[in-house]
Image: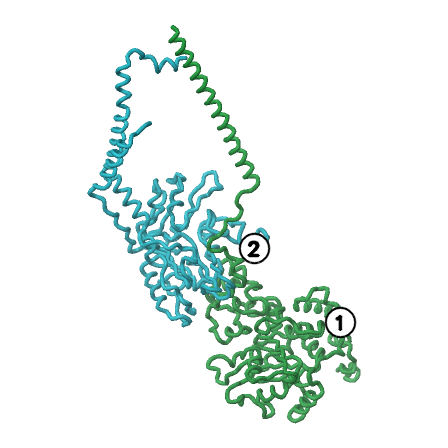
Chain colours: A green, B cyan
């Protein structure tokens, strides 16, 4: 048995990330590779990987995070803790100062509430609020209570003092599975709850909310968001639904490994049929990839690894990340295909026929046409001449006859 | 040649009298749909623009891949696997797009977009078949598919001019060119299979079936309320395979039900068909009109006979003076020949 006392105490190692990686058996080389990978995942140029690395290793600037759980299954936290990439959870938990998380903190009951209160007092206007789970709007939110407080009360208390908010998972982003019909608790996402409750920052400006939908959300995307903030000191660019464009900018359909089968009309018709075994497109089985924006084909769902994202193992995409798709449409139901800028991919009704005449063809046609004109002019002249000669000779002949 | 006005009118009246007094001057009856005629119902509101029908059409008809595609033009690249940007001698079937303004929403006329599938309409009374002087284009008496026989074709391309949908295409780039058009996969039909585009379509946007049944299906769809969910058959109407989809707001008409005497390719969409490049045609086939005129004129060869007779008479009258002059001019018999010998 290993002597516990001789094993270096992690917390005593100081703020140097490299030392902690040693403890976990991660080589420097492996760590640099990971940094390059996540730089690409954030949509940043490779040249910025140095800055990302610096942000990773500079542990002093740890932003305080208060992590609230509302109506949810804690799946997002669980998947975060079970990431397969080198210590994604370590990086996240080392990069942030997680002052309050009901799942991960050792304290419980009044102690936990006290930690929350103290952190709130200390980091007013500076901390990041992470929300996991939806907010029940019916009956004042009595269907979900933490420390006798409803989500609405907690948000009124905490959200105005946050610098920014991250809604992790589909529940916090747009309501998730609880918002599926008949939605008995009138579950909504964080942004919607803030709007309905009229919650703004203490200075009166709107609290920026970054949505990271997914069921569960990819921990990689959370890490990328945190790293983006630490590297560039600003929040990542988001789309109309508040999702970072580096992760949710494209349809799953656009980058899907089975896309060539879709384009070539090779569809699996049933689970287990020949096409399904051949790895053909799952569109007819109800794949929601054509209407779901997420980076699953690129980094795989939930960071489980080994090509084990749903489409990779032969299951149609469920559309968990997309509002109105996951938990709202039946699994077998065929999706609508979102066509991005359709007109560039399809000919218009009245097509202008491109190409036309090439220079060579025009030259040949010109030569032939010109030749014909020259010949015709020449022939015409000759004909005229001939006619004139004939007329002259006929006239002279007539004269001769007359003379005779 | 001098024709005096008097003679000219004589000829004209003779021809007109023949044409107008012919007792058989009645319209040719419109051609009837064969009871077993089959067709394709294309529903633009179900189309997702995957172009799978184009791919399978090419495979079924052994057409080569084409370059110069919209994708290549849009992005300035080459070598992409896509079909050409319009129907041509290598594309029998083409998905096109109507896009208006921001083109945000599918199946909306303003600031929306809609797909449309273009291929041979397989008219009930096809103009191309009527125009073809050698019966290279024929209409199958049972299925109604308009098919092409390259052995008979003389390459006159009358069919191209006759077709109101601009469907027959000519292989201008070949030394021995043929006419190319969708033949409703007649070889597949003969084997009991369905056209490749319908077989490939994952959403049932291209649906195969008997024309009469397809029309019933089309009218059933026109009764749907927008945004309700309905069952739509996939591949073939009687195949039993269905899918559920949200109903779009249909433009209240089935294109091809009456157009040019009816077509066996039927279309449904959410935007007006003129916007989708489908011309507003009357309910009567042009073939019916032109054949009525032609068959009336040539009935019993009366008009040609009278016309020819009139022309001969006019020529005779016109040359009367010449003949009289010649007969009275005996002293110069060798006048005409003399020049030639010099």
Residues at marks 2 and 1, CA–CA distance in whole angstroms? 41 Å
Query: Which class describes the residues within 10 Å of circle 1: few (<14), some (14-19), or many (20+)?
Result: few
The residue tagged with tag 1: helix, strand or loop?
helix
Give the side of residue A293 with respect to residue B30, left or right: right
In the rendered structure, the residue with mark 2 lies on which chain? Answer: B
Image: B295 above or below A375: below
Query: Which class describes the residues within 10 Å of circle 2: few (<14), some (14-19), or many (20+)?
Result: few
The residue where tag 2 is placed is: B74
- Where residue B41 sits: x, y (%)? 38, 59
Callout 2–callout 1 Cβ contact below 8 Å: no
Q: Nearer the viewer, residue A338 or B283?
A: B283
Give the side of residue A84 with respect to residue B144, left or right: right
- Where residue B220 sits: x, y (%)? 34, 66
Quadrant of the image containing the N terminus of chain A? bottom right
Q: Nearer the viewer, residue A399 or A33?
A: A399
Q: Residue at x 38, y 5 (%)?
A: A404
Q: Residue at x 49, y 79 (%)?
A: A180
- Where residue A289 sits: x, y (%)? 53, 67
In the rendered structure, the residue with mark 1 lies on which chain? Answer: A
Residue A321: give its label: none
Image: A284 above or below A107: above
Q: Residue at x 42, y 67 (%)?
A: B248
Please indicate, yes or no, whether residue B204 appears anywhere in the rendered image: no
């Amino acid at each position: 048995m290993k002597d516990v006392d001789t094993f270096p105490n992690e917390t005593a190692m100081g703020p140097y990330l490299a030392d902690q990686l040693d403890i976990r058996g991660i080589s420097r080389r492996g760590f640099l590779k990971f940094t390059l990978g996540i730089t690409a995942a954030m949509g940043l140029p490779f040249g910025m990987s140095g800055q990302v690395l610096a942000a990773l290793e500079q542990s002093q600037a740890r932003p305080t995070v208060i992590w609230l759980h509302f109506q949810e299954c804690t799946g997002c936290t669980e998947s975060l803790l079970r990431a397969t990439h080198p210590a994604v959870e370590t990086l996240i938990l080392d990069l942030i100062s997680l002052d309050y998380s009901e799942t991960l903190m050792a304290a419980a009951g009044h102690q936990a509430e006290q930690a929350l209160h103290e952190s709130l007092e200390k980091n007013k206007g500076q901390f990041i609020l992470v929300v996991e789970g939806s907010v029940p709007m019916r009956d004042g939110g009595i269907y979900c209570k933490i420390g006798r407080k409803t989500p609405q009360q907690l948000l009124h208390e905490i959200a105005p003092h946050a610098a920014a908010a991250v809604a992790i998972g589909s529940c916090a982003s747009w309501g998730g599975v609880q918002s599926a019909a008949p939605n008995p608790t009138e579950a909504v996402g964080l942004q919607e709850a803030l709007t309905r409750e009229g919650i703004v920052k203490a200075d009166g400006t709107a609290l920026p909310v970054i949505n990271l939908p997914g069921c569960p959300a990819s921990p990689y995307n959370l890490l990328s968001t945190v790293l983006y903030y630490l590297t560039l000191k600003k929040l990542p660019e988001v789309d109309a639904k508040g999702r970072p464009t580096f992760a949710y900018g494209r349809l799953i359909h656009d980058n899907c490994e089975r896309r060539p089968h879709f384009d070539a009309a090779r569809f699996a018709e049933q689970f287990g049929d020949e096409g399904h075994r051949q790895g053909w497109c799952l569109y007819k089985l109800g794949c929601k990839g054509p209407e779901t924006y997420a980076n699953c084909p690129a980094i795989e769902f939930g960071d489980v690894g080994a090509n084990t994202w749903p489409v990779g193992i032969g299951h149609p995409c469920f559309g968990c990340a997309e509002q109105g798709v996951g938990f709202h449409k039946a699994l077998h139901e065929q999706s609508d295909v979102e066509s991005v800028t359709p007109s560039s991919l399809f000919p218009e009704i009245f097509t202008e026929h491109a190409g036309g005449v090439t220079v060579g063809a025009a030259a040949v046609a010109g030569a032939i046409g010109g030749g014909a004109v020259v010949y015709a002019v020449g022939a015409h002249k000759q004909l005229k001449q001939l006619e004139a000669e004939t007329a002259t000779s006929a006239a002279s002949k007539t004269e001769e006859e007359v003379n005779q | 040649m001098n024709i005096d006005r008097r003679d000219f009118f004589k000829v004209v009246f003779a021809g007109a009298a023949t044409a107008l007094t012919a007792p058989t001057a009645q319209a040719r009856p419109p051609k009837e749909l064969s009871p077993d005629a089959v067709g394709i119902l294309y529903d633009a509101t179900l189309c997702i623009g995957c172009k799978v029908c184009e791919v399978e059409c090419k495979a079924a008809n052994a057409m080569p891949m084409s370059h110069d595609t919209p994708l290549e033009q849009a992005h300035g690249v080459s070598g992409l696997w896509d079909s050409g940007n319009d129907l041509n001698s290598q594309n029998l079937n083409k998905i096109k797009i109507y896009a208006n303004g921001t083109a945000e929403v599918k199946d909306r006329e303003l600031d929306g977009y809609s797909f449309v599938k273009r291929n041979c309409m397989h008219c009930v009374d096809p103009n191309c078949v009527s125009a073809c002087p050698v019966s290279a284009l024929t209409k199958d008496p049972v299925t109604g598919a308009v098919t092409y026989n390259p052995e008979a074709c003389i390459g006159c391309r009358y069919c191209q001019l006759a077709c109101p949908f601009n469907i027959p295409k000519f292989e201008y780039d070949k030394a021995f060119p043929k006419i190319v058009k969708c033949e409703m996969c007649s070889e597949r039909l003969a084997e009991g299979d369905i056209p490749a585009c319908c077989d490939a379509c994952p959403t049932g946007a291209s649906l195969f079936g008997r024309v009469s049944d397809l029309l019933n299906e089309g009218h059933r769809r026109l009764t749907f309320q927008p945004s309700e969910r309905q069952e739509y058959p996939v591949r073939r109407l009687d195949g039993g395979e269905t899918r559920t989809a949200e109903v779009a707001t249909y433009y209240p008409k089935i294109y091809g039900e009456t157009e040019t005497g009816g077509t066996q390719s039927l279309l449904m969409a959410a935007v007006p068909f003129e916007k989708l490049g489908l011309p507003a045609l009357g309910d009567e086939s042009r073939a019916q009109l032109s054949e009525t005129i032609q068959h009336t004129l040539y009935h019993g060869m009366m008009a040609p006979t009278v016309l020819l007779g009139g022309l001969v008479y006019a020529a005779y009258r016109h040359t009367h003076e010449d003949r009289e002059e010649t007969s009275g001019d005996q002293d110069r018999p060798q006048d005409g020949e003399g020049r030639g010998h010099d």
